[in-house]
Amino acid sequence: MRSPACAAKVRDDMALTFWRRSSVFAKTTTLPFLFLIVGVGGYSWAQVVLMAFSHLRIEAGEFVWQPAGLANFREILANELAMYSLAVTALFVVATVVLSIVLGLVLALLVQRSRRLNRISQVVLLWPAIVAPVVVSLIWLLILSPNIGVLNKLLDTVRLPTQDWLGTEVGAIVAIIIVDVWHWTPVAFLLLYTALCAVDEEAIEAARCDGANEWQVIRYIKFPMLVPAIIGTVFIRAIMGVKAFDEMYLLTAGGPNGATTLVSLHIRDVFFDQLNYGYGSAFSVLLVALMSLVIGAGMLVRHLRAIRRFSATREVEA
């Protein structure tokens, strides 16, 4: 008969063997996906980078390549429309990210406090995110249209002047911000609500037993625990904002007077209308580099803050 120590060693060996086999299986099953990403995505991205440093034209149905060096990047910096599209995109990303995070956090807190309507609220709030962008554009076009729009009909009913919501520069940029926030706030809500449900209930109950009110619980208990989820959501929404295309193209097509020309619309015009592949590729590479720098800087700041907090904790314990 085996001793307890021997039985424990056997169990540990079996667990280690199972973990190793599971790890090998997991790595093996991800190899096809990895090869697909590297083979397809890596090759495509390499072509884009090569095009960014080249002048291309089409002759007899084939690309003719000529080395361009940094000429395409210099052309971007000298192009006023390119710089303007970067500024509009920055404004759009900041506005949509901030509004989505604030609304998503408020909705997550409200839904968590709800008891009877919790499930129904989740379904209703997630509905906009699963609607196709074309349908979203059609819905908001029927709301904002100056002639047949529901919003102008309501204003006319109460004897107020109607507005050309998509016909003015300020109105158009505000409109696409509202549409994007309405469409993608459910993503922020879902991420923050999931993180909120994982907050330690014992810490919350302990704070309430010490006399903390609801605002103090949110500020000093829930919010600090949600910071990692908020930062992650900011990164996700920022990337989505830079990639935004469908609603803006269908609602305003970059107008009026280029007021809503995001970088995605500008790159699309350069590629498909002007057939300037080198310039468009260079702009794409520049955009990816800028986003990588911003995200990398954010992650570095977060890492340095974590190191500082860890050092402070060690000093207090010492």
Image (cartoon, rainbow, N blue to C red):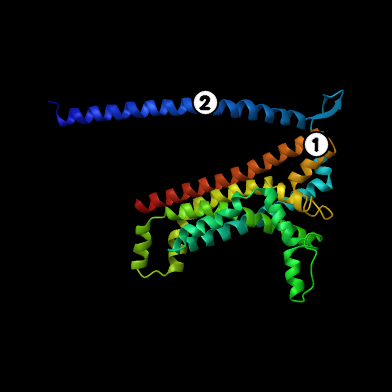
User: Element type at marker 2?
Assistant: helix
Q: Amino acid at mark 2?
A: Leu
Dot 2: few (<14), some (14–19), or many (≥20) neighbours within 10 Å?
Answer: few
Tell how many labels. 2
Spatial separation of the CA atoms under disc 1 and disc 2: 35 Å
> In x, y percent, where is residue 295?
60, 44
Name the residue: 76% across, 48% down: 249
Q: Which residue is mark 2?
A: 31
Q: Which mark is residue 118?
A: none
Closer to us: 218 or 187 = 187
- Disc 1 target residue: 279
In percent of width and height, residue 259 lies at 80, 55
Vertical position of residue 181 compared to residue 79: above or below = below
> Residue 208's x, y, as percent?
36, 67
User: In the image, which is nearer the foreground, mark 1 or mark 2?
Assistant: 2
Vertical comparison of 155 with 181: above or below: below
The percent coordinates of residue 176 (x first, y second) are: 72, 56
